[in-house]
Image (cartoon, rainbow, N blue to C red):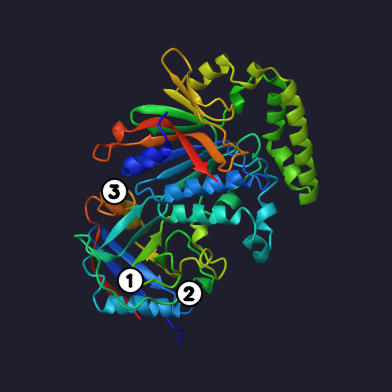
C-alpha cells in the first residue's frame, strides 16, 4: 500500500486551509509541526504578520499578540530541494538558520530568495515542508486584510486572523 | 534640506518608502559600495519601511546577470556584490519590497539577478500614489531629448533584439564593449553643452501631463524643480564621494522619502527630498 502523506487542516475564522506535508523531504520539520498540532499549540493562534506579495506568517502568537511558549528549536532542512513557491508552507525563524520552533508561513508568491543556496548564514534558506492543497481562496482573502503596527511588530492584521483549530486529517 | 540621519533618528516610525538613484556602484569605487551598505543598515533599522525604490543607474555598468549568476560558490563568497545582496535579502525578509528600475548604464540588469534578493524589476514610467498625489517615476534619461545622439543610442540599446544580441556575446566580449562605450560616452559628454544633458522642458510637460508630479534621477541636478507652473519635478541626486583627500571621506546623495505621520492614515503621506551622507 502506498504511504499517504500526512494532511493537516487549519480551521480559521476566514475559512479552512488544508495542507499536505512532505514527510519524506522534511522529516524533522514535519514531525515538529505535527507535535504542535497534536498538543493543540496552534489552536487560538493568529496569522500575526501578513504581507501581500510575500507571505502570511502565524502559529506563534495568540489574539492578544502574546507569544506562546514553544518546544526547542529544530534543525534547518531547507537543503531538501523543496522551493518556496506560491502555496507552499515553510518554517519561520530568526536570523539563526536553526532556530525554527512553531511559527510557519505560507508563501503567496514564488519567493526564490528564501530557497537554500548554501550552508552559511545567508544561504541556508527557509525549510519548505508541505503545500496547500485546498483553501488558497482563503489565503487570497487573508493577504488582503488591512494591517498596521502593534508594539514592536509591523504588518499585524487590524482584525485578528485566527486559527480556531488545527487538526490532523490523515497521518 | 533635512538630513536622512536626522529623520531616521527622530521619526523612524514615519519612514515608509525610500527612493534612490544614480549610485553608479562598481568595484572601482568601494566607498560608494560601503555607503550603500550603510544606507541598507539604516533601512533595516526602520520599523515600518515598506519599499525601497532604486530608480536607475544603480550600477556603473552591467554586462548581464550571468556575470554574477555563473560564478562558483567560492567566487561569490568574495565578490563585492555578495554583501550587498545579503543585506537586500534581509531587508526583503523583513517585509520591505525592493523595486528596481533600469538606468542608462545598467539597462541589461535582469529579473534573475533581482530574484537573488526578492527584488522586482519595474518598467518606466512607474506610477505611484503618495497621499492624494500621483507621481510619475522614471530614470530621467528619456526626458533629455535635446541630446539627439543619445536618444538614438538609447532607442537602439532598449531594443529587445539588441539586448538579445549583446547578451549572447561572451562575457569577455561584453566587458570590452562596455569599456568602449564608457570611454566614448565620457568623450562625448565632455564636448556637450550643459543644457543638452539636462531635461527638455517640452518633454517634461508631456511626461507630467497625466500625473501630479515627476520623480527621477539621471541629470545629477538634485532639487525640487518646477515641471509646469503648478506641478513639481523632484530630482534625486547622484552618489558623490566628497572630501576624498581628507582623513574622513564622505559619500553624500540627495535621496527621496515617503513619510506618514505615525497616527494618521496613508492619505496624508508626503514625499520629501533629504540629504543622505555616510562616512566611509
Q: Residue at x 46, y 50 (%)?
A: B41
Q: Where is residue A87 in the image (x, y as percent from the top left)?
A: 42, 61
Disc 2 on helix, strand or loop? loop
- Numbered disc 3: what chain? A
Mark before the other along the chain sequence, 2 or 1: 2
Q: In which quarter of the image is residue B273?
A: top left
Disc 1: which residue: A102
**Name of the residue lying farthest toward the front:** B247
Residue with the mark numbered 2? A77
Q: Do labels 2 and 1 share a chain?
A: yes
Q: Mark 1 falls within which chain?
A: A
Instruction: Judge left or right: residue A71 versus residue B18.
Output: left
What percent of the width, then of the height, locates residue A99?
40, 71
Label 2: how many Cα within 10 Å (few below 14, some 14–19, many 20+): many
Crowding around mark 1 (Cα neighbors within 10 Å: few <14, some 14 to 19, many 20+) is: many
**Which of the labelled discs sits on residue A86, or is there none?**
none
Q: Is residue B58 above or below residue B208?
A: below
The residue tagged 3 is: A147
Is residue A90 shown above or below B127? below
Residue in the image at 58% along x and 47% along y: B33
Amino acid at each position: 500500500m502506498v504511504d499517504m502523506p500526512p494532511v493537516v487542516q487549519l480551521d480559521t475564522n476566514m475559512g479552512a486551509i488544508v495542507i499536505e506535508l512532505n514527510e519524506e523531504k522534511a522529516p524533522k520539520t514535519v514531525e515538529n509541526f505535527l507535535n504542535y498540532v497534536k498538543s493543540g499549540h496552534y489552536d487560538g493562534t493568529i496569522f500575526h504578520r501578513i504581507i501581500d506579495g510575500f507571505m502570511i506568517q502565524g502559529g506563534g502568537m495568540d489574539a492578544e499578540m502574546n507569544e506562546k511558549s514553544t518546544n526547542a528549536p529544530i534543525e534547518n532542512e531547507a537543503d531538501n530541494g523543496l522551493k518556496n513557491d506560491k502555496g507552499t508552507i515553510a518554517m519561520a525563524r530568526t536570523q539563526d538558520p536553526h532556530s525554527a520552533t512553531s511559527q510557519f508561513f505560507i508563501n503567496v508568491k514564488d519567493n526564490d530568495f528564501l530557497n537554500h543556496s548554501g550552508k552559511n548564514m545567508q544561504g541556508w534558506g527557509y525549510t519548505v515542508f508541505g503545500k496547500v492543497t485546498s483553501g488558497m481562496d482563503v489565503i487570497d482573502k487573508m493577504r488582503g486584510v488591512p494591517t498596521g503596527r502593534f508594539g514592536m511588530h509591523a504588518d499585524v492584521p487590524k482584525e485578528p486572523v485566527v486559527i480556531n483549530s488545527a487538526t490532523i486529517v490523515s497521518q | 534640506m533635512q538630513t536622512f540621519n536626522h529623520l531616521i533618528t527622530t521619526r523612524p516610525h514615519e519612514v515608509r518608502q525610500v527612493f534612490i538613484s544614480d549610485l553608479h556602484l562598481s568595484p572601482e569605487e568601494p566607498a560608494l559600495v560601503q555607503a550603500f551598505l550603510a544606507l541598507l543598515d539604516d533601512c533595516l533599522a526602520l520599523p515600518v519601511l515598506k519599499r525601497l525604490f532604486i530608480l536607475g543607474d544603480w550600477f556603473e555598468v552591467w554586462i548581464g546577470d550571468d556575470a554574477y549568476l555563473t560564478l562558483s560558490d567560492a567566487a561569490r563568497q568574495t565578490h563585492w556584490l555578495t554583501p550587498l545582496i545579503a543585506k537586500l535579502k534581509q531587508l526583503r525578509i523583513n517585509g520591505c519590497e525592493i523595486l528596481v528600475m533600469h538606468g542608462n548604464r545598467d539597462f541589461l540588469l535582469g529579473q534573475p539577478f533581482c530574484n537573488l534578493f526578492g527584488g522586482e524589476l519595474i518598467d518606466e514610467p512607474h506610477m505611484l500614489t503618495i497621499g492624494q498625489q500621483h507621481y510619475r517615476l522614471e530614470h530621467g534619461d528619456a526626458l533629455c531629448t535635446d541630446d539627439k545622439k543619445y536618444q538614438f543610442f538609447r532607442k537602439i540599446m532598449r531594443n529587445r533584439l539588441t539586448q538579445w544580441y549583446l547578451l549572447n556575446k561572451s562575457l569577455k566580449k561584453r566587458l570590452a564593449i562596455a569599456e568602449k562605450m564608457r570611454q566614448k560616452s565620457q568623450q562625448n559628454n565632455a564636448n556637450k553643452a550643459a543644457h543638452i544633458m539636462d531635461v527638455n522642458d517640452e518633454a517634461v510637460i508631456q511626461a507630467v501631463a497625466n500625473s501630479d508630479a515627476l520623480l527621477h534621477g539621471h541629470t545629477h541636478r538634485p532639487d525640487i524643480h518646477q515641471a509646469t507652473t503648478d506641478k513639481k519635478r523632484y530630482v534625486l541626486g547622484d552618489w558623490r564621494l566628497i572630501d576624498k583627500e581628507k582623513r574622513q571621506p564622505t559619500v553624500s546623495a540627495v535621496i527621496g522619502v515617503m513619510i506618514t505621520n505615525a497616527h494618521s492614515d496613508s492619505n496624508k503621506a508626503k514625499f520629501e527630498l533629504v540629504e543622505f551622507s555616510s562616512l566611509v
